[in-house]
Amino acid sequence: MKTLPVAEFCPHFSSLLKEVESGNEIGIAFGRKRKIIAVIVPFEEYKKLKTKRLGTLEGKAKIEFRGDWPITDEELINS
């Protein structure tokens, strides 16, 4: 993964988006310690990350949540 500080990221935004489009991930570092605070990933990869996993039932069952699901993912996991 390529990592750039914010100051270098901004002027090269368009070319970096082309890299992401071709499948690369770009880390954005911030502060004196250049701590990575965000990662830009291709949209298809992001969609995979956002899918809910079923743990031991993965591949054996399917679950879908309605858009008006009343609790957050964190509340569901921590209950």
Image (spheres, rainbow, N blue to C red):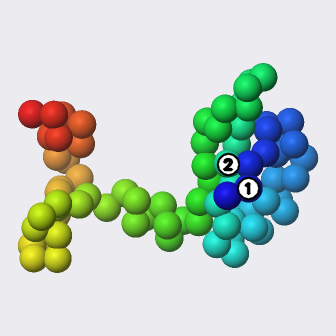
Mark nearer the N terminus (1 vs 2): 1
Q: Quadrant of the C terminus?
A: top left
**Most distant residue in the front direction:** 33
Residue contact between numbered discs 1 and 2, judged by CB atoms under 8 Å: yes
Q: Is 58 left, or right, of 39 in this rendering?
A: left
Please name the residue that numbered disc 2 is placed on: 27
- Asked whether residue 32 is in view, the answer is yes
Q: What residue is shown at x 77% (from left), y 68% (from top)?
A: 18
In the picture, the disc for residue 61 is: none
Q: Is 9 left, or right, of 23 in this rendering?
A: right
Q: What residue is shown at x 78% (from left), y 45% (from top)?
A: 4
Q: Quadrant of residue 50?
A: bottom left
Distance from label 1 to label 2 (Cα)? 6 Å
Q: Residues within 10 Å of mark 2 (few under 14, many from 20)?
A: some
Q: Is 4 left, or right, of 68 in this rendering?
A: right
State whether residue 77 is above or below residue 50: above
State whether residue 29 is above or below residue 17: above
What's the amino acid at mark 1? Lys
**Most distant residue in the top direction:** 32
Q: What residue is shown at x 67% (from left), y 48% (from top)?
A: 27
Please name the residue that numbered disc 1 is placed on: 2
Q: Quadrant of residue 30?
A: top right
